[in-house]
Image: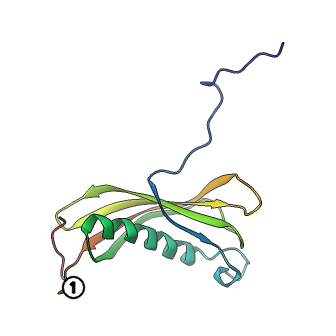
Amino acid sequence: MPERQSPALSPEPPLPQGEPLVRTIAMPADTNPAGDIFGGWLMAQMDLAAGNAAARRARGRCATVAVEAITFLSPVFVGDEVSLYGEIIATGRTSMKIAVEAWRRDRHSDETLKVTQATFTFVAIGADRRPRALP
């Protein structure tokens, strides 16, 4: 009889942190000269995802003021499904820091892989385009 491996000994694949915020498909127009998805496109998707979380928390308009420690771990390819997850990790009087992870899934597979992570700082802004207190 084959020996069963204890669940504690079988490593679980890592899971995305935070809630799902955006899901999109990487298209040919989003490639760099080498044919991979352009890092700037991926960063823009991450900014949109962080902006969703920020606007929900601020109950209104927000602006990106900083991006910290963006790390590109693995390339994204044309046709990949890109899912962005995020969570608010800190708040101040007018600002919030949001951790964002980007995960790719080949369209012919169920396997997912984290490809990028970063921390975005947003500030809640009022109608006068000046910082306002978070509710």
Q: Secondary structure at mark 1?
A: loop
- Whether 3 is drawn above or below 57: the answer is above
Q: Which residue is located at x 43 percent, y 59 percent? A: 86
**Residue furthest top as drawn:** 1
Nearest the camera: 87 or 67? 87
Left or right, 97 with respect to 110, comes to left
Nearest the camera: 130 or 71? 130
- The quadrant in which the N terminus is found is top right
Left or right, 55 with respect to 79, comes to left
* Residue 18, horizontal then vertical, whole percent: 44, 53
Left or right, 78 with respect to 82, comes to right
Q: Around disc 1, counting alpha carbons within 10 Å, would you say few (fewer than 14), some (14 to 19), or many (20 or more)?
A: few
* Residue 44, horizontal then vertical, whole percent: 49, 76
Q: Which residue is located at x 64 percent, y 81 percent? A: 30
Q: Which residue is located at x 44 percent, y 73 percent? A: 48
Q: Which residue is located at x 25 percent, y 68 percent? A: 58
* Residue 72, horizontal then vertical, whole percent: 57, 63
- Whether 41 is drawn above or below 101: the answer is below
Residue identified by numbered label 1: 129
Mark 1: which amino acid? Arg
**Residue furthest right as drawn:** 1
When asked about the image quadrant of residue 25, the answer is bottom right
